[in-house]
């Protein structure tokens, strides 16, 4: 259920209209920082500073962050790193003269012990990854007394410190409880952001059209909310601590859309902010046409599954094979119109645009991802329906029906449906604090141990 009863006008948009007075922006952030205690979380892999092609990107980020003076702390959540890589990161932070930082070395003994504590309490982390990394970083931020938490990735090629100022401004200065970055995705004279442009936008428009035609008004609230965001899949976000405590986070490729769905349900004052006035650049994913477990192909399936699961589980949408077949027909038509618009826009801006390639991605990747997600979500109920029809048709099954065969089939189907609709996700930190009242003390102890090891 949607907790805050937001209308479609609730997402406030902060746009860059003129050249900003950067000093005035920083001054306001510094004025509010003592109360809001903003903490920056930056999840990263060791390869993002050890690989030759990535290192200049990360060096620039550190150089920019060294000039930010209002942050309470910076947490570097380090994954896939040995002690040598963790010490290399320490050397880089010291060389760039960053202040008030923490290396959260996830593979080290201190944080491994903390993860074991959470696991023993039932908060299982079965797979390493960004979701697990950020979840622990959030616990650190709470233990440090943060009232505002920002999350920024470590692969932003065009990062500037003012982008962080803009991201935090709505939460720190204007008291929004959520802020999400938006920007244009143009690199080397080409438009990127293909999953947003060619999958998510046409899919939302297709769902809107379908729900309006069938008069399923209840479904339109979430769709309208998501459509307000100019870049739903951006990873740069900021939260008030109160909202963050109540948030769950997906640990698959549907993480960004899952976060917005949680914000729809739990936030009272969401905002989006133009992160950069210039085209924004970070690492690009391969399409992976023939591999559903990699690249944009895997991302698209997870996004569609996450969105549809929210509509089914929380909004009560009833689905079938026909639903997804109809949806794909509408999606194709909408996507074709969008591609024509992008082709004209590219020509107007003198950008390179391969219309055949974009149409191929829609037809042979994203269309199939929607069908694949539909298959995952409907197959079990179809099997159950057909099985029940068979056992009620043939008299040979009558003795077994009298013994409860139909009820057993339905119970098994119900259990399997829960597994199908289960998005891999974290619990809320509110739940952790309730079950482990001593966890904050343990985290502070871990912070001190890592500070003794690495400084900060």
Image: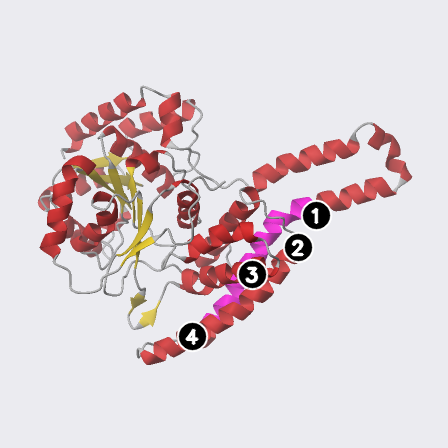
Question: In this figure, which residue is indicated by the disc labeled 4?
Answer: 341
Few, some or many residues within 10 Å of mark 2 (<14, 14–19, 20+) = some
Kindly report the distance in space between the C-alpha atoms of the residues bearing marks 3 and 1: 19 Å
Kindly report the distance in space between the C-alpha atoms of the residues bearing marks 2 and 4: 31 Å
Question: In this figure, which residue is indicated by the disc labeled 3?
Answer: 368
Residue occupying image coordinates x 50% and y 41%: 423
Kindly report the distance in space between the C-alpha atoms of the residues bearing marks 2 and 3: 14 Å
The mark lying in front, picked from 3 and 1, is 1
Question: Which badge, 2 or 1, comes first in the chain's sequence?
Answer: 2
Residue 250 falls in which quadrant of the image? Answer: top left
Few, some or many residues within 10 Å of mark 4 (<14, 14–19, 20+) = few
Horizontal and vertical percent position of residue 280: 27, 62
Residue 167 in the figure: left or right of residue 224: left
Question: In this figure, which residue is indicated by the disc labeled 1?
Answer: 382
Residue occupying image coordinates x 66% and y 52%: 320
The mark lying in front, picked from 1 and 4, is 4
Q: Are the residues tagged 2 and 4 within 8 Å (C-beta)? A: no
Q: What are the residue bounds of the magenta stretch?
A: 357-382
Question: In this figure, which residue is indicated by the disc labeled 2?
Answer: 321
* Secondary element type, mark 3: helix
């Amino acid at each position: 259920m949607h907790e805050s009863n937001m209308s479609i006008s609730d997402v406030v948009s902060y746009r860059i209209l003129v050249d900003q007075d950067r000093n005035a922006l920083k001054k306001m952030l510094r004025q509010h920082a003592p109360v809001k205690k903003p903490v920056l979380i930056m999840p990263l892999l060791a390869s993002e500073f050890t690989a030759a092609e990535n290192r200049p990107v990360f060096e620039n980020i550190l150089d920019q962050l060294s000039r930010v003076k209002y942050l309470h702390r910076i947490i570097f959540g380090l994954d896939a790193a040995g002690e040598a890589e963790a010490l290399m990161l320490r050397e880089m932070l010291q060389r760039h003269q960053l202040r008030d930082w923490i290396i959260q070395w996830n593979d080290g003994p201190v944080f491994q012990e903390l993860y074991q504590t959470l696991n023993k309490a039932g908060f299982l982390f079965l797979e390493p990854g960004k979701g697990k990394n950020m979840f622990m970083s959030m616990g650190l931020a709470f233990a440090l007394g943060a009232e505002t938490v920002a999350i920024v990735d470590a692969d932003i090629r065009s990062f500037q410190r003012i982008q962080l100022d803009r991201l935090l401004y709505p939460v720190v200065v204007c008291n929004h409880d959520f802020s999400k970055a938006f920007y244009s995705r143009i690199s080397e004279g080409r438009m990127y952001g293909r999953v947003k442009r060619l999958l998510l936008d046409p899919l939302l428009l297709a769902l809107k059209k379908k729900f309006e035609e069938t008069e399923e008004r209840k479904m339109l609230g979430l769709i309208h909310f998501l459509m307000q965001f100019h870049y739903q899949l951006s990873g740069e976000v900021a939260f008030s601590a109160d909202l963050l405590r109540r948030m769950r986070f997906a640990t698959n490729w549907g993480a960004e859309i899952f976060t917005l769905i949680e914000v729809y349900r739990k936030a009272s004052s969401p905002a989006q902010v133009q992160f950069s006035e210039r085209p924004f650049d970070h690492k690009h994913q391969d399409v992976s046409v023939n591999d559903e477990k990699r690249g944009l192909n895997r991302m698209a399936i997870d996004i569609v599954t996450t969105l549809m699961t929210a509509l089914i589980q929380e909004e009560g949408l009833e689905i079938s094979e026909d639903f997804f077949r109809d949806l794909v027909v509408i999606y194709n038509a909408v996507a074709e119109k969008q591609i024509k618009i992008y082709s004209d826009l590219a020509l107007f801006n003198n950008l390179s645009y391969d219309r055949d390639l974009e149409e191929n991605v829609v037809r042979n990747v994203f269309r199939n991802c929607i069908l694949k997600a539909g298959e995952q979500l409907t197959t079990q109920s179809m099997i159950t329906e057909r099985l029940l029809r068979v056992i009620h048709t043939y008299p040979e099954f009558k003795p077994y029906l009298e013994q409860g065969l139909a009820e057993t089939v339905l119970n098994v189907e119900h259990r399997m449906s829960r597994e199908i609709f289960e998005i891999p996700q974290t619990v809320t930190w509110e739940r952790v604090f309730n079950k482990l009242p001593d966890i904050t003390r343990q985290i502070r102890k871990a912070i001190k141990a890592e500070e003794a090891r690495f400084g900060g």
